[in-house]
Image (cartoon, rainbow, N blue to C red):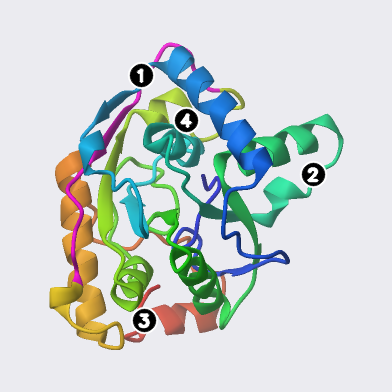
Amino acid sequence: MTSADAVAPEPDETPGAGDVPTNPSWFYTLGRRALAPLARAIYRPRVEGKSNIPREGRVIFASNHLSFIDSIAIPVAVAPRPVHFLAKSSYFEGTGFKGWLSKTLFTAAGAIPVRRGAGQAALDALDQQRQILETGAAVALYPEGTRSLDGRLYKGRTGVAFLALQTGAPVVPVGLIGTDKVMPVGAKFPSLRERVTIRFGEPLDLSHHGPASSGKARRTATDEIMAAIHALSEQELADAYNEAPAQSPIEKIRRALPHERR
């Protein structure tokens, strides 16, 4: 959802107020039990490789990102196992019926609100996800950082690999196919004529790359994750990061300098 861009999703977002959940709330459990069967009945998703989903213990689902509904598709496919992701706080702060509906859907899907920030923001968001993982829970992340608007698979940011190397959590690669057709960018409502395919790859143990403190380890682990996602999604590769155009001369200079994209 970058729609609910779960961080690594938007790498410049910071956690908002609220406790990191250690167990699914009754509202999440109720919403998931209602949402998952309804979504499966309407969209009849094809789920492949579900045996690759660990039944318990910390795990990171690392997926390509094509549509607003990706962060609903993944929890539906992973059910009955709960999975959490970080979403823009604006999805929880609307007013009226539309605001209530947005907050209800995102909460039911397992989203946790984060606020936009700068500087330390990306590290703070990653730290919140680390706390979730350390409870033995599952999180879903998009290494590309935000939705692909042209359907290509962009280079991965290193935040997912950093979390995996820091916590020891295995990474399950996910390939989403067709979510951009169900709900294209700019669409107000999802199409009922399209079907989605969700592919889960074998869990990746990234520890052989080295410690989380090593930039080389983070980069090579990220490349392994993205190669696995590519094998599942079969997208055309974009040899670039998925970034909005720089808005200032300072930002253009910063991007031109060697730095790690989280």
Question: Residue tagged by mark 2?
Answer: 94
Place residue 13 in its image quadrant: bottom right
Q: Amino acid at mark 4?
A: Pro
Residue 195, numbered label: 1
Task: Give the label, 2 or 4, closer to the camera.
Answer: 2
Position of 57 relative to 181 (above/below): below
Task: Compute the Cα span from label 3 to label 4.
Answer: 32 Å
SS class, disc 4:
loop
Q: Which segment did they paint magenta?
A: 190-206
Residue at 35% over, 42% down: 150
Label 1 crowd (10 A; few <14 / some 14-19 / many >=20): some
Q: Is residue 199 left or right of residue 11?
A: left
Q: Is residue 70 above or below residue 248?
A: above
Task: Report the residue at 46% width, 47% height from top.
Answer: 83
Instruction: State the residue at coordinates (63%, 32%).
Output: 30
Q: Looking at the picture, how far across and down is residue 241, in whole percent?
A: 33, 63
Q: Which residue is mark 4?
A: 184
**Separation of marks 2 and 3 at Cα, in angstroms:** 37 Å
User: Tag on residue 61?
Assistant: none
Check the image and report above or below for 246 versus 140.
Answer: below
Q: Amino acid at mark 2?
A: Gly
